[in-house]
Image (cartoon, rainbow, N blue to C red):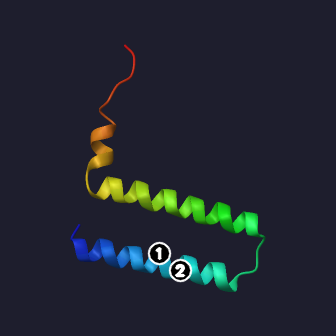
Amino acid sequence: MPLIQVILVLIVVGIVLGLINRFIPMAGSIKSILNGVVVIAVVLWLLSVFGILGQLSTIRVGK
């Protein structure tokens, strides 16, 4: 995936999350959970895009 597409996806996700936080009324705790889930999902997606997550899956713990 080209770097421009990655940057565009990050911008779109940020704008959508900002609009949701600003215009949809919800409790502060729910906003925090939503923001945390989105950040974790974006970080995992970025790790997958750059090939780091694929390498981590080959690591075995134990026998």
Q: Residues within 10 Å of mark 2 (few under 14, many from 20)?
A: few
Which residue: 72% across, 65% down? 30
Q: What's under tag 2, amino acid-wise?
A: Val
Which residue: 48% across, 77% down? 14
Do callouts 2 and 1 mark residues in contact (Cβ within 8 Å)? yes
- Foreground residue among 48 and 31: 31
- Foreground residue among 28 and 2: 28
Q: What percent of the width, then of the height, locates residue 16?
A: 53, 80
Q: Secondary structure at mark 1?
A: helix
Q: What percent of the width, then of the height, locates residue 5?
A: 28, 75
Quadrant of the rendering where the N terminus is positioned: bottom left
Q: Residues within 10 Å of mark 1 (few under 14, many from 20)?
A: some
Quadrant of residue 43 within the rendered picture: bottom left
Q: Secondary structure at mark 2?
A: helix
Q: Residue 5 bears which disc, if any?
A: none
Q: What percent of the width, then of the height, locates residue 40?
A: 50, 56
Instruction: Determine the residue located farthest toward the left in the rendered image.
Output: 2
Quadrant of the rendering where the C terminus is positioned: top left
**Number of marks in the rendered image:** 2
Quadrant of residue 21 within the rendered picture: bottom right
Which residue: 75% across, 69% down? 28
Q: Give left or right: position of 32 versus 13.
A: right
Q: Give left or right: position of 12 versus 5.
A: right
Q: What's under tag 1, amino acid-wise?
A: Val
Which residue: 78% across, 70% down? 27
Q: Residue 13 bears which disc, if any?
A: 1
Instruction: Determine the residue located farthest toward the top in the rendered image.
Output: 63
Q: Give left or right: position of 51 versus 61.
A: left
Q: Residue 16 bears which disc, if any?
A: 2
Image position of 13 with respect to 40: above or below: below
Real-space CA distance between mark 2 and mark 1, rounded to the nearest whole angstrom:
5 Å
